[in-house]
Amino acid sequence: MPDYPTTKPPTVDYFKVPRRLWRIMKKHLPVEVPPSRAGGRRRIGNRAVLNGIWYVLWTGCQWKAVQRTWFGASRSVLHERFQTWQEQGIWDKVFQALVKFYRRAQQIQWRWQAIDSRACAAPLGGSATGKNPTARAKLGSKIHILVDQRGAPLAIDISGANQHDTWSVPNLVFHSAVKRPGSEQHFCADKGYDYNAVRQVIEREGYTSHGHRLRFFESLKA
């Protein structure tokens, strides 16, 4: 098997956000409130909460699987802070900052890009949910992602599970976290995106269109 370029580090500390990333991310988190002189329970710090969220996202475990002793924060605190920061738009800012960091540190591989999506359950509902036609119409969402040649995300879009994949293409192409250069770029997708409307969008944006995702992986051998 040939070795493909990847953005995954050789070793990952699932319990702690790397220091370089923490220095970037903390700039976008809410200012921490100092303890009140009147007493009361001290608010859990952003670093501890972020470490807990980092662990959940890396391992894919349920929030209720996290033990308080691991990060000094209960699972309810981690989930509440995660949702609050989402509502405040903080994760969008963090994502943009990290993509810019990746561009500086590793250089984005623009020549080949790929798009895909996955459906996930969303039993509590929300604005970006819909009835999943493949799961007995249960509420769900779709995560759409555009990646560079290494597989690093450049744009993310969330939609209802009942939305067709093709509808997300303009959002991903037009709202990349960083500005695309004018160099040669190839756009790869599977047959679910094989529609004239999609081809018109990506060709208008200067991409060379490829009808199947396998060509994206074949390009990595070159």
Image: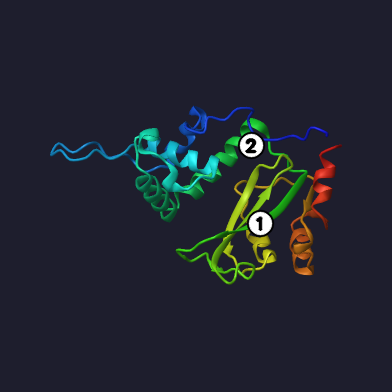
Q: Nearer the viewer, residue 213 or 98?
A: 213
Real-space Cα distance between discs 1 and 2? Answer: 23 Å
Name the side, left or right, on which 58 lies relative to 1: left
Q: Determine the residue positioned at 59% across, 41% down.
A: 99
Q: Amino acid at mark 2?
A: Arg
Q: Determine the residue positioned at 85% across, 43% down.
A: 218
Q: Amino acid at mark 1?
A: Ser
In x, y percent, where is residue 152? 66, 42
Placement of 130 over or under 5, stated as above or below: below
Q: Nearer the viewer, mark 1 or mark 2?
A: 1
Furthest residue to the left? Answer: 38
Placement of 180 over or under 19, stated as above or below: below
In x, y percent, where is residue 87? 42, 56
In x, y percent, where is residue 181? 71, 45
Name the side, left or right, on which 162 lies relative to 24: right
Furthest residue to the right? Answer: 222
Residue holding disc 1: 117
In x, y percent, where is residue 13? 53, 29
Name the side, left or right, on which 14 lies relative to 119: left
Residue holding disc 2: 103
Quarter of the figure with residue 174:
bottom right
Quarter of the figure with residue 131:
bottom right
Q: Nearer the viewer, residue 207 or 147?
A: 147
Q: Determine the residue positioned at 76% across, 56% down.
A: 189
Q: Quadrant of the N terminus?
A: top right
Asked if the residues shown at circle 1 and circle 2 are in contact, with their CB atoms under 8 angstroms apart, the answer is no
Q: SS at mark 2?
A: helix
Q: Nearer the viewer, residue 101 or 120?
A: 120
